[in-house]
Amino acid sequence: MTDVMERAGLLDASDPLAHFRNRFVVPDGVIYLDGNSLGALPVGVAERLRDIVQDEWGRGLIRSWNDANWYPAPIRIGDRIGGLIGAAPGQVAVCDSTSINLFKVLCAALRAAPDRNVLIVERDNFPTNTYIAHSVADLLNVAVVSVESGDVADLNAAVEDAGERLAVVSLTEVNYKTGWRYSMPSVTDRVHSVGGRMVWDLCHSAGAFPVDLDGCGVDYAVGCTYKYLNGGPGAPAFVYVAARHLDGFDQPLHGWHGHAAPFSFDAAFEPAPGIDRALAGTAAQLSLLALEAALDAFDGVDMNALRAKSLALTDLFMEVIDAQRASDIEIVTPRSEHDRGSQVALRHPNGYAIVQALIARNVIGDFRAPDVLRFGFAPLYLSHTEVVRAALELVDVVTTRAWDRPEFTTRRTVT
Ligand SMILES: *Cc1c(COP(=O)(O)O)cnc(C)c1O
């Protein structure tokens, strides 16, 4: 293993992204492999939040909606996220949660195709996506067809079978558990070939690797900002509506911020002409502005270099685990670069306790029931050496059974 550690050291020495680590506050000694769940705190956010609270709220009071440009923030920040996901300005808004934005786009997409009545989803998606899809389908009287996550043949067969009845396909690009990744261009094309519309969830994509929504002709997308975009706990989500669909975008949560003239206080709803119509009510302004400050961490980042580093990090991690083939550890994430995002998922019957034992050693990952250990790799604040050290700790915890202690095996609320 000295060999792989040496290689990691060399990779760190020539890493073009190494200096971005200075843009984050990561506690000393912690190897943080959970940026796919809650991104690390970027430098400057705490100071910016203090100013927002003390000056803009404290002194500016209500005037700050104008004077501090609070009101346009959802669209202004949406455009910034658009730059990271291949969306030209005017198509992304930041608001509400991923769950709520998914509800909006699914309703709007289904309403846009009233003569079609099939919604295709995936069986092993993040549960909220499944719950929302079924609740929308119930409301609008549409049939849900569930395909196996990560099984493109199953998906294609379902698309073929639905044919002209296909209204919408809603998938998450990178599976939250396995790290398996769909091919956005080819799936989107396939869905369009029978006249369906495509909704992508980018929770595990945005900020993790380059995404090209406009280039792929995607219809709608949603995603979190508190994962790889480091917006902070509960930061508002984003929603993308392709420019060609904006005029007809009829999302059901008509609220005053989605009105064409919110401050005319009209009794009748008239949707705003652009992406503003995706908004419902007043933003969680402090979280929204914290996200804006957090996005500075991505200024000047070459997303292709980010992807290259992400692949190098995940390759190293898997290489160490493979080489020391710890008993019962199975790597679930596909090896092929095209088929994975920026996380590595492992399976072990004592996964929960192993993750707890690792956290006690300052290597932070997480666990998803029933047996998946998840490690997310945020290339802006992780080094190759750290990743090798984390993998060696993991192998040690498994081979020495260091996890087999009551303090590690007892489950807490958040896993
Ligand atoms: C993290 C995640 C969510 C979270 O949704 P919230 O509404 O923010 O709680 C939803 N879907 C996927 C695929 C996720 O990974």
Image (cartoon, rainbow, N blue to C red):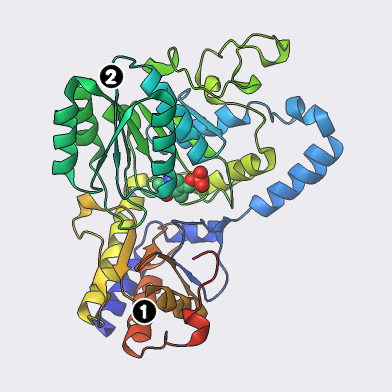
Residue 384 picture location, percent across and down: 36, 69
Left or right: 90, with 44 as reference point:
left
Mark 1 and 2 residues: CB-CB less than 8 Å, in contact? no
Query: Is residue 87 visible from the viewing direction of this image?
Result: no
Residue 74 picture location, percent across and down: 59, 31
Quarter of the image that includes the N terminus: bottom left
How many numbered discs sit on the rendered protein? 2
Residue 338 picture location, percent across and down: 21, 49
Residue 121 picture location, percent across and down: 30, 38
Residue at position x 38%, y 64% in the image:
374
Task: From the viewer's side, name the closer residue of 95 and 407.
Answer: 407
Q: Which mark is residue 379?
A: none
- Crowding near pointer 1: few (<14 within 10 Å), some, many (20+)? many
Task: From the viewer's side, name the closer residue of 187 and 154.
Answer: 154
Residue at position x 23%, y 47% in the image:
148
Q: Which mark is residue 116?
A: 2
- Using the rendered view, name the quadrant where residue 62 is placed: top right
Q: Secondary structure at mark 1?
A: helix
Residue at position x 28%, y 84% in the image:
2
- Crowding near pointer 2: few (<14 within 10 Å), some, many (20+)? many
Residue at position x 36%, y 66% in the image:
370
Relative to residue 328, is residue 151 depicted above or below? above
**Which amino acid does the dot numbered 2 rest on?**
Arg
Relative to residue 292, is residue 251 depicted above or below? above
Left or right: 276, with 250 as reference point:
right
Q: Kindly identify which residue carries mark 1.
A: 394
Relative to residue 386, is residue 258 depicted above or below? above
Query: Gap between marks 1 and 2, in whole Å?
Result: 50 Å
Query: Is residue 281 visible from the viewing direction of this image?
Result: yes
**Which amino acid does the dot numbered 1 rest on?**
Leu
